[in-house]
Image: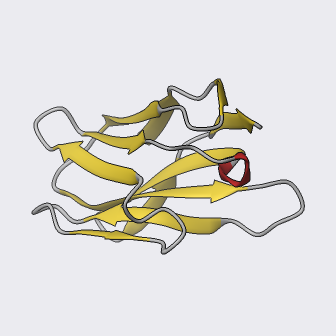
Amino acid sequence: QVRLVESGGDLVQAGGSLRLSCAAFGSIFNIGPMSWYRQAPGKQRELVATITSIGITDYADSVRGRFTISRDNAKNTVHLQMNSLKPEDTAVYYCSALIRGNTYWGQGTQVTVSS
């Protein structure tokens, strides 16, 4: 059984920073790509950033240059450093991981950016 647990969500003022973390627990071997998604109220879940097992990254245009995704393969963790936050970044942020052909999701962590 694989479980992903996110942390780090908070209320922050516009222009501020947050660092989200996600840890994978369970029977884990060779985690593939890990990603962060977000879902704002009334909107579909959208991909924010992805990082492969060898560190290749990709970002949504809306966060490129402000957010940085990283991972620690030894600790089975993925992080999202979010800088210059905007009110439109407000959402529930979810991490996901591809493990042995299955996609697993965390429970989500709330990020709220006040103007």
Residue 73: image quadrant is top left
Display colour scheme:
secondary structure
In the image, 80 versus 4, the foreground residue is 80
Say which quadrant the C terminus sits in: top right
Percent across and percent down for residue 42 are 89, 62
Residue 72: quarter of image: top left
Tell me which residue sits at (72%, 46%) in the image.
87
x, y percentage for residue 59? 40, 69
The furthest residue to the right: 42
Please give the count of numbered marks on the rendered protein: 0
Relative to residue 22, is residue 94 depicted above or below? below
Answer yes or no: is residue 1 visible. Answer: no
Q: Is residue 34 above or below residue 26?
A: below
Q: In terms of depth relative to the viewer, which is nearer, 15 or 113?
A: 15
At horizontal 22% and vertical 66% (from top left) the residue drawn is: 52
Can residue 27 be seen?
yes
Q: Residue at x 56, y 38 (%)?
A: 15
What percent of the width, then of the height, locates residue 86?
64, 48
Q: Residue at x 14, y 61 (%)?
A: 55
Residue 100 vs residue 5: left or right?
left
Looking at the rendered image, the quarter that the N terminus falls into is top left
Report the front residue among 104 and 111: 111
